[in-house]
Image (cartoon, coloured by chain):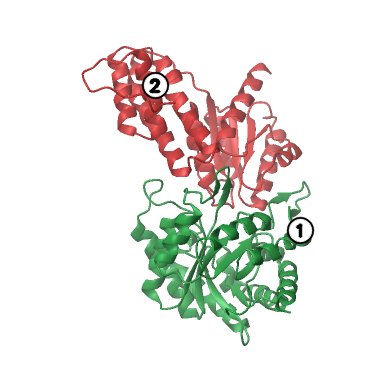
Chain colours: A green, B red
Amino acid sequence: MKKRIVLLDGGMGTELIRRGFPQGECPELWNVEKPEVVEAIHRSYFDAGSDVVLTNSFGGSRIKVSAHGLEKRCYELNHAAAQIAKEVKKENEFVAGSMGPTGKFLRPQGEYSEEEFEEAYAEQAKGLADGGVDFLLIETQYDLREAFCALRGARRVCDLPVFVTMTYNHVPRGFFTLMGNSVAQCVKELEKNGVPVLGSNCTLNSEEMADLVKIMRGLTSLPLIAQANAGKPSLSTDGKVSYSQGPEDYIRFIPRIIENGANLIGGCCGTDPEYIRKMAEIIKIGKN
Amino acid sequence: MFDEINVKEKGEIMSKEELLAGMAKAVIEGNKEEAVALAKEAIAEKMDLNEVIEKGYVPGIQVAGKLWEEGEYFLPELVTSAECMKAAMGALRPELEKAHIDVKSAGKIVIGTIEGDIHDIGKNLVASILSANGFDVVDLGADVKLEKFIEKAEEEKVDLICLSALLTTTMIGQRKLIEMLKARNFLGRFAVMVGGAPVSQKWADDIGADGYAENALTAVQAAKNLLKKMKKG
């Protein structure tokens, strides 16, 4: 893994929607109700060149699925997510168990205690681990405290490696999470707590991500993950969704993301297998 | 600008200016106890409570908002400042009612995230900042049926309906609601403001929304402008 850039996958939500998923419902439910669709998406990413795919479990924590009235099915939905991806992977292909944020806040901004967050993530991690993922990826975290709740929850129930990506906004003073965690604070504290691979995903486009990777690289020698959005989405009046960065524009900054020190790259919102295929070409060129 | 102000020891009488500056400072720093204590002091000193709000607390929340826009403050600080504002207003309210002082409401608003969308971080922030800026806010929460927005808007006689959407498919609900209002001849009775990460000014224009706000701070100005326009019209 250390020898070359590892290629992750791209967006899951947008791919589900393209295949008829009614937005607003619980995407994790399709792990049970339409596993063939989720499987087809994983396969399309492996075919495009991904070394690793992320399970369809981004919103699979108990807190998130309970918004859809599915709190009793948390374990089941995550277990199914892992199994689908595991069935698809071939030799030298890997499955990461995706664990996205709860969408809620810890006290005092929100109603939850750290113990409640930890418990919600532990249940999800157990489902993913039992379902057979190779490692866990706690992703898109906007609060470092929440990321640590997830980390503790995951470590409590399994021995798998746990990676963490934070999501940063580009504000006038630099890159910060929604809650105001700086890049340095996140990188240093995650490293101190033994996270073996860390990085950033979502929110930023690929150009901004390249700048962020440079900052992260200056702070750690750990392997870094970078998964940028395809810019920002917009909706035309006839209901068509498009992202501000098409594949060509997005790809332009991939070499810079790699040069600046990313080791595991992939896409996020708005990216699809076409983006990944183009990234695979770049990585291959880089090898020669 | 507020650093040099030292709130005096208890027992000492502060000048009006000192009190007002102290109120702003309490809101900026998110010091709820101080914000409430100063509100009580203002009542005891028989200060003009409208002035207390307008020149004491409101400038505080405005500075907090500015610091947020500049990237000095983040969500926790902004929410805490808004809560201080709310606490201070809560302390003033009984006295205002007793004295039959009509606090000028900036306007009445119904707000929520559209059905099919459970995301409410942005919406909550907008609701809280609008409320801190003197709007009377009815928050319907997340995953709200379009019909419910109209029902509540009528029932509560609001001026403005604010629709939040994080998903591109629930954004379509923003257009649908405007069509529903049109079909019922309600356009002009309620103004409609839209927001959410994928929402843009262009989208707002395309669907005929009255207003758009990129963030919680611009929402305050946009809402004020809209209501001004409505009153003129």
Establish if B57 lies above or below A91: above
Q: Are the two marked residues, 2 and 1, in contact with CB atoms closer than 8 angstroms?
A: no
Establish if B39 lies above or below A199: above
The answer to whether any part of residue A25 appears in the image is no
Disc 1 is placed on an element classified as helix
Instruction: Return the chain for callout 2.
Output: B
Q: Can you name the residue that lies furthest to the bottom here? A: A91
Instruction: Return the chain for callout 1.
Output: A
Residue B23 appears at what percent x and percent y?
A: 37, 24
Question: What's the residue type where badge 2 is placed?
Answer: Ala
The answer to whether any part of residue B115 appears in the image is yes
For the residue pair A48 and A207, the one nearer the viewer reads as A207
Residue B9 appears at what percent x and percent y?
A: 23, 23
Q: Which residue is mark 2?
A: B21
For the residue pair B116 and B93, the one nearer the viewer reads as B93
Quadrant in which the C terminus of chain B appears:
top right
Q: Residue at x 77, y 46 (%)?
A: A237
Q: Which residue is mark 1?
A: A249
Give the quarter of the image for residue A212.
Answer: bottom right
Q: Dot 2, crowdedness within 10 Å: few (<14), some or many (≥20)?
A: many
Establish if B169 lies above or below B104: below
Mark sitting on residue A234? none
Question: What's the residue type where badge 1 is placed?
Answer: Asp
Q: Residue at x 41, y 78 (%)?
A: A159
Tell me how many marks there are: 2
